[in-house]
Amino acid sequence: MTPQTRTLGERAAVPMGVVLAVIGTVHFASPQFFDELVPPWLPPDERFWTLASGVAELLVGIALLVPRTRRRAGWAAAALFVAVYPGNLYMVWDWRDRAWTEQVVSWLRLPLQIPLIWLALRIARDERVAKG
């Protein structure tokens, strides 16, 4: 199959998997950064959610790299992107007093989730994606 005949889901699965696996790994290398993005009212604490989301991102990322698990991983990726959205909303609120450049970054993360969810759903619904 030539790259021109591959579906969007087929072309997107591996890059999305790599990005999620790398970001998941970074949750463990620099947990303090991610702790600050977790709304503090979520029990039990911020570190729990940092590590849990890191594990989820790592596992979903790896599953996207394996053709046999790719379609189910697309569903999991979509759910993951929806699940972390409240953290992005919290980031906008929490960063409201930071430099304008940081505030712009926090606001740009909000619309970025929408195409990520859409792309993950394309992977999940693509019958050809599991053929690798």
Image: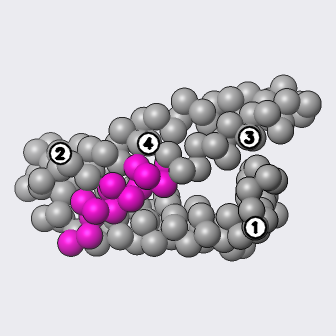
Q: Is residue 55 visible?
A: yes
Q: Amino acid at mark 1?
A: Pro
- Residue carrying label 4: 116
Spatial CA distance of label 2 from label 3 is 35 Å
- The magenta span reads 68-81
Q: Earlier in the sequence, mark 2 or mark 3?
A: 2
Dot 4 and dot 2 residues touching (CB under 8 Å): no
Q: Residue at x 12, y 53 (%)?
A: 127
Dot 3 falls on a residue whose secondary structure is helix
Spatial CA distance of label 1 from label 4 is 28 Å
Q: Position of residue 45 (x, y in %)?
A: 78, 65
Disc number for residue 7: 2
Spatial CA distance of label 3 from label 1 is 17 Å
| Residue 67 occupies quadrant | bottom left
On the rendered structure, is 33 left or right of 73?
right
Instruction: Specify the principal SS of the magenta part.
Output: helix
Q: Is residue 3 above or below residue 52?
A: above
Q: Amino acid at mark 3?
A: Tyr
